[in-house]
Image: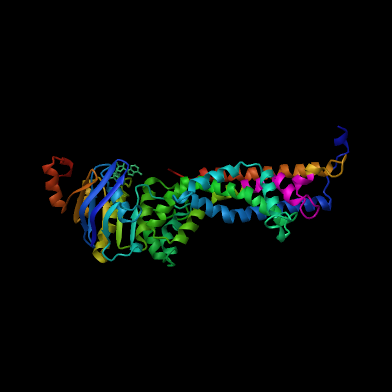
């Protein structure tokens, strides 16, 4: 209990910066993943094409894949002597976003695909009956499935901010540049003074709780108001 | 005229096989037949929801955007009653007129429920709304697949008179699926009967009555 006795909530500028960077990473990664993941998920549900089963299986595999291995792969691609070494992206914010894209996009596409399997056939039939164009049908699908999509995005955001392995490897935990809440905690910079780590832990806990609350609300909304 | 010629479609163990079926323009057609005889499947093929294995469907110059259908379980957008009603106009960049939408809401018995969440409507209300939503953009060929099955008698009367009025003013082509002889005989000029995936008979309601009597189907006597 010696440790906790000299604990005080540490909200120094460095800590706040770390929190801000983590949130930024979460938003950027989730946003970019949704640009790829939502159309991919709808495409995978839509109809059979060559290689679809393989893509689906790869997608499902990546959903449960250890992020640290994804980090390693992205590291190998971005390192100075790697295929994309000239871009000098390693140990930067974009490198962390790229690694997280590989981790999160499969979550978005997998969840959207599962939701679309239930909802999309009826919506498409309706769109055909109204003679909606292709793009009108696409936007209608997104609109009608918006709660499923929010749910997938909230899950992805939660995954992004709580992920350690990949951002550690490709980001390098550089203060003000690539230090996120989880990597900061895992290093416990000031040995003996755990207040920053504990503060970050508490903030993460609160954030996760908020995301869970949001998802529960969405779930409840989803099941409400229908009279079938 | 819509011409369906040598149409074949196999779904698992079900085989639809129609040698020739013609739907004259601007008439009300009835489509009858037992459960599982292939009525909904035929509609899916004509409206392009499904591709035939063989055969041709000639829409006789109708464009696909003039065709619409209502299903046995209509889909309600997760939005208000009002937005469901005007959806077909919105996607055609047409402004809904207040009189028009109010007229439809009144005919559906949905006045005052414009802002209700459409999926929470009762099944009959949903069917009425889907009917109105299908007609509001003035299509030229309409398939009604048992959409009146859950409507109360008064609503059925309202929709029968809507159909009759449209036929008086600016007639369009209708294909109505129903299991109720009264429906078919009140509305239709021509009746087509399906049996086990085949087209068995076409004729006027009177001829259908004779045909049914021969087959000892008393409920259909005319
Ligand atoms: N996706 C499917 N998979 C397997 N069988 C199907 C499928 N769709 C239709 N069928 C079969 O095709 C047959 C015709 O179905 P259809 O829905 O056209 O009948 P219907 O005449 O509309 O019947 P009802 O009056 O009950 O609506 C049925 O025997 C049904 O089991
Ligand atoms: Mg049917």
Look at the image and say whether residue A169 sits in the magenta stretch. yes
Q: For this rendering, which residue is in front, A30 or B202?
A: A30
Quarter of the image with the N terminus of chain A in it:
top right
**Residue A110 is at least partly visible in this image:** yes
Which residue is found at the position 82% from the left and 52% from the top?
Answer: A14
Query: Residue A26 placed where, x, y %?
Result: 68, 51
- In the rendered structure, the answer to whether residue A15 lies left or right of residue B201 reads right
**Residue A26 is at least partly visible in this image:** no
Q: How many numbered markers are drawn? A: 0
For the record, the magenta segment spans: A155-184
Q: For this rendering, which residue is in front, B6 or B179?
A: B6
Q: For this rendering, which residue is in front, A6 or B12?
A: B12
Q: Is residue B68 above or below residue B122?
A: below
- In the rendered structure, the answer to whether residue B209 lies left or right of residue A101 reads left
Q: For this rendering, which residue is in front, A176 or B211?
A: A176
Query: Residue B204 placed where, x, y %?
Result: 15, 54
Query: Residue A115 placed where, x, y %?
Result: 51, 46
Please, what is the dominant secondary structure of the magenta stretch? helix
* Res A208 → quadrant: top right
Q: How is the image coloured?
A: rainbow
Look at the image and say whether residue A158 sits in the magenta stretch. yes
- Spot the residue most to the front: A81
Query: Residue A65 placed where, x, y %?
Result: 63, 42
- In the rendered structure, the answer to whether residue A10 lies left or right of residue B63 reads right
Quarter of the image with the C terminus of chain A in it:
top left
Q: Is residue B123 above or below residue A140?
A: above
């Amino acid at each position: 209990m010696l440790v906790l006795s000299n604990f005080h909530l540490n909200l120094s500028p460095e800590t706040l910066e770390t929190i801000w960077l983590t949130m930024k990473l979460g938003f950027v990664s989730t946003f970019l993943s949704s640009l790829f993941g939502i159309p991919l998920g709808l495409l995978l549900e839509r109809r059979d094409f060559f290689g679809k089963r393989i893509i689906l299986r790869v997608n499902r595999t990546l959903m449960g894949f250890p992020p640290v291995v994804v980090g390693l792969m992205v590291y190998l691609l971005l390192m100075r002597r790697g295929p994309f070494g000239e871009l000098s992206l390693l140990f930067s914010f974009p490198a962390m976003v790229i690694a997280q894209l590989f981790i999160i996009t499969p979550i978005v596409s997998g969840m959207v695909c599962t939701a679309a399997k239930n909802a999309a056939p009826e919506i498409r039939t309706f769109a055909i009956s109204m003679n909606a164009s292709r793009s009108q049908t696409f936007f209608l699908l997104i609109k009608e499935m918006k709660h499923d999509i929010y749910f997938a995005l909230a899950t992805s955001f939660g995954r992004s901010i709580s992920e350690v392995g990949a951002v550690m490897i490709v980001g390098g935990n550089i203060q003000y540049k690539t230090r996120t809440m989880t990597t900061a905690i895992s290093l416990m910079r000031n040995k003996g003074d755990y207040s920053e780590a504990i503060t970050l832990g508490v903030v993460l806990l609160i954030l996760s709780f908020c995301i869970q609350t949001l998802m529960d609300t969405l779930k409840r909304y989803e099941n409400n108001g229908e009279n079938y | 005229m819509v011409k369906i010629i040598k149409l074949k479609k196999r779904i698992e163990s079900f085989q639809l096989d129609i040698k020739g079926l013609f739907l004259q323009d601007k008439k009300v057609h009835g489509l009858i037949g037992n459960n599982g005889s292939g009525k909904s499947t035929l509609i899916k093929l004509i409206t392009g929801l499904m591709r035939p294995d063989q055969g041709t469907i000639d829409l006789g110059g109708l464009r696909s955007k003039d065709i619409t259908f209502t299903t046995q379980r209509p889909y309600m957008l997760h939005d208000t009653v009002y937005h469901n009603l005007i959806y077909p106009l919105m996607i055609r960049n047409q402004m809904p007129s207040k009189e028009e939408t109010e007229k439809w809401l009144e005919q559906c018995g949905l006045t005052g429920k414009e802002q209700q969440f459409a999926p929470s409507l009762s099944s009959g209300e949903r069917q009425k709304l889907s009917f109105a939503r299908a007609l509001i953009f003035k299509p030229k060929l309409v398939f009604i697949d048992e959409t009146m099955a859950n409507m109360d008698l008064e609503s059925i009367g309202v929709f029968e008179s809507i159909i009759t009025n449209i036929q008086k003013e600016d007639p369009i082509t209708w294909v109505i699926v129903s299991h109720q002889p009264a429906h078919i005989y009140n509305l239709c000029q021509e009746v087509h009967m399906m049996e086990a995936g085949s087209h068995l008979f076409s004729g006027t309601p009177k001829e259908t009555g004779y045909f049914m009597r021969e087959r000892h189907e008393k409920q259909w006597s005319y």
